[in-house]
Image (cartoon, rainbow, N blue to C red):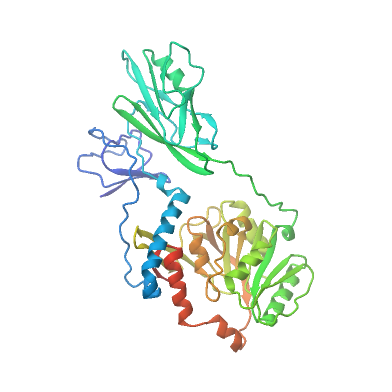
């Protein structure tokens, strides 16, 4: 059962066992039992049920994902190596979960009509530091005595400036009890409760259990070191905003055509070239940086090298056999990125090919790993303010990207010959990507290059090794491109 209720409703009461969420002005109510009564266009009515547990509930009980028609990654691993690889893979995955804090991503429900007030989001404490917990309060009817309790695991609690006659037990400990016959006085004490982080970690969380009688609330405290901003001076023109980057291998004729076409439109922009050709040739010109690599180090190793040398806010990635034309305008890329600062990557089109895709990833169960599928020419919503742009998970090899965002993801140098989707796979959930119409670059005519083609299309073993690599690295059960 799935019910959509527009948020123009004047009254709202949900105390059932259903799960609900708000998404851009629409309230979604799912799995609602027949005990919940939804009625009318102006209000909701609901029956009050016995209190349920508010959590935290572990989020690890995942089910296996389906691999029908997919390439099974484990089948690409040698049989005599599989058992030991599976053991190492599971150990590394558990460490990854600890490192990324997924063990703290428990589901916590805020109960309806609770008398407890507490911060649900936004309270951050630097490690080994004391901070006042904002917003703690109790709203309850008259009682002879009011008593609340708070407890934590990775820190200690205190009340500042406590007088002798005030009843506060557990000062400087992980559990704090506060009581008073006066509600105003109790709330005054709650307004002075501090949390001190006692375990050093650059980014983690602690859970606070806050209770009054049979009411309990759980909220989290983010323990995090402040990050130092890393900013790029955009300067005054396109030359100080963007660097053009490319990787070349055995294609100097194409590379020189690309450089000449760039210089026709952008005579001063910096060009960075990563080159792992077998017999390197000199590439010269104004504002060109040519980096020679060991022979045949590969596609992604070259990308890493080129991007590592960028000093501008953005870089434009192009292949060495592209050609700039009158429709190739880097300024249009920058305009989009500047107006939508959340974007990390904006892709265009190579000729008439506006290649883009969506990735469907199912985490799967804990033992087998996840399932990934790529959908060509599938996108998400339109980028606000740009009708010709839409959100995607991957784009063609002609894109403008934020330098710092791409460096955080990086290009896996294990992938030497055939790789593209893999970068976007590694950036899934971290990079916000769009594909936009009207941003084009030309493609040179293909030339006969038997030596290049032998490296470019290495055969089945390369594909098999790549699947085995995904099996461990991405904790993947199967992939379908």
Image x and y of residue 462, in percent? 48, 78
Q: Is residue 386 left or right of residue 208?
A: right
Residue at 26%, 47% (x, y): give it.
31
Q: Is residue 239 left or right of residue 338?
A: right
Q: Is residue 249 left or right of residue 463?
A: right
Does 379 appear above or below 323? Answer: above
- Picture mark count: 0
**Residue at the top extreme, as displayed:** 165
Residue at 62%, 83% (x, y): give it.
445
Quarter of the rendering containing residue 350: bottom right
Does 459 appear above or below 66? Answer: below
Residue at 47%, 73% (x, y): give it.
466
Image x and y of residue 342, in percent? 56, 51
Quarter of the rendering containing residue 14: top left
| Residue toward you, 435 or 53 | 53
Residue 277 seen in this snapshot: yes
Image x and y of residue 117, in percent? 40, 27
Does 185 appear above or below 9? Answer: above
Image x and y of residue 164, in percent? 46, 11
Does 54 appear above or below 95? Answer: above
Residue 328 seen in this snapshot: no
| Residue toward you, 286 or 132 | 132
Quarter of the image with the C terminus in it: bottom left
Q: Is residue 424 left or right of residue 58?
A: right
**Residue at the right extreme, as displayed:** 286
Residue at 36%, 12% (x, y): give it.
181
């Amino acid at each position: 059962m799935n019910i959509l209720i527009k948020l123009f409703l004047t009254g709202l009461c949900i105390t059932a066992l259903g799960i609900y969420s708000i998404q851009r002005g629409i309230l979604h109510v799912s799995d609602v039992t027949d005990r919940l009564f939804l009625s009318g266009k102006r209000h909701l009515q609901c029956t009050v049920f016995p209190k349920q547990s508010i959590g935290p509930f572990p989020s690890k009980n995942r089910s296996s994902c389906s691999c029908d028609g997919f390439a099974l990654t484990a089948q690409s691993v040698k049989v005599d190596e599989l058992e030991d690889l599976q053991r190492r893979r599971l150990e590394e995955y558990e460490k990854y979960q600890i490192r990324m804090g997924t063990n703290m991503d428990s589901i916590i429900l805020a109960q309806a009509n609770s008398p407890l007030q507490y911060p649900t989001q936004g309270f951050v404490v630097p490690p080994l530091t004391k901070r006042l917990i904002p917003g703690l309060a109790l709203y309850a009817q008259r009682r002879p005595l009011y008593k609340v309790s708070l407890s934590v695991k990775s820190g200690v609690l205190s009340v500042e400036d406590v007088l002798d006659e005030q009843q506060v037990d557990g000062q400087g400990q992980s559990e704090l009890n506060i009581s008073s016959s006066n509600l105003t006085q109790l709330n005054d004490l709650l307004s002075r409760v501090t949390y001190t982080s006692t375990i050093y970690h650059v980014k983690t969380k602690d859970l606070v259990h806050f209770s009054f009688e049979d009411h309990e609330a759980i909220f989290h405290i983010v323990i995090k070191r402040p990050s130092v901003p890393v900013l790029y001076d955009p300067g005054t023109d396109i030359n100080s905003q963007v660097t053009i980057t490319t990787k070349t291998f055995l294609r100097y004729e194409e590379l020189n055509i690309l450089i000449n076409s760039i210089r026709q439109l952008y005579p001063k922009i910096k060009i960075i070239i990563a080159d792992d050709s077998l017999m390197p040739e000199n590439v010269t010109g104004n504002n060109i940086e040519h980096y020679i690599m060991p022979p045949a180090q590969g596609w992604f190793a070259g990308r890493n090298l080129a991007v590592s040398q960028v000093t501008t806010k953005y870089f434009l990635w192009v292949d060495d056999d592209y050609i700039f034309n009158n429709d190739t305008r880097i300024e249009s890329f920058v305009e989009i990125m500047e107006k939508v600062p959340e974007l990390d990557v904006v892709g265009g089109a190579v000729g008439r090919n506006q290649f883009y895709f969506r990735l469907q990833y199912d985490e799967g169960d804990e033992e087998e790993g996840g399932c990934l599928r790529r959908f060509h020419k599938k996108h998400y919503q339109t980028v606000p303010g740009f009708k010709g742009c839409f959100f995607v998970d991957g784009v063609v090899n002609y894109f403008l990207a934020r330098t710092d965002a791409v460096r955080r993801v990086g290009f896996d140098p294990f992938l030497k010959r055939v790789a593209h989707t893999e970068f976007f796979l590694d950036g899934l959930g971290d990079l916000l990507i769009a594909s936009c119409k009207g941003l084009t670059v030309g493609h040179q005519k293909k030339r006969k290059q038997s030596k290049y083609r032998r490296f470019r299309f290495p055969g089945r073993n390369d594909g098999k090794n790549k699947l085995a690599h995904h099996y461990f690295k991405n904790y993947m059960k199967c992939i379908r491109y």
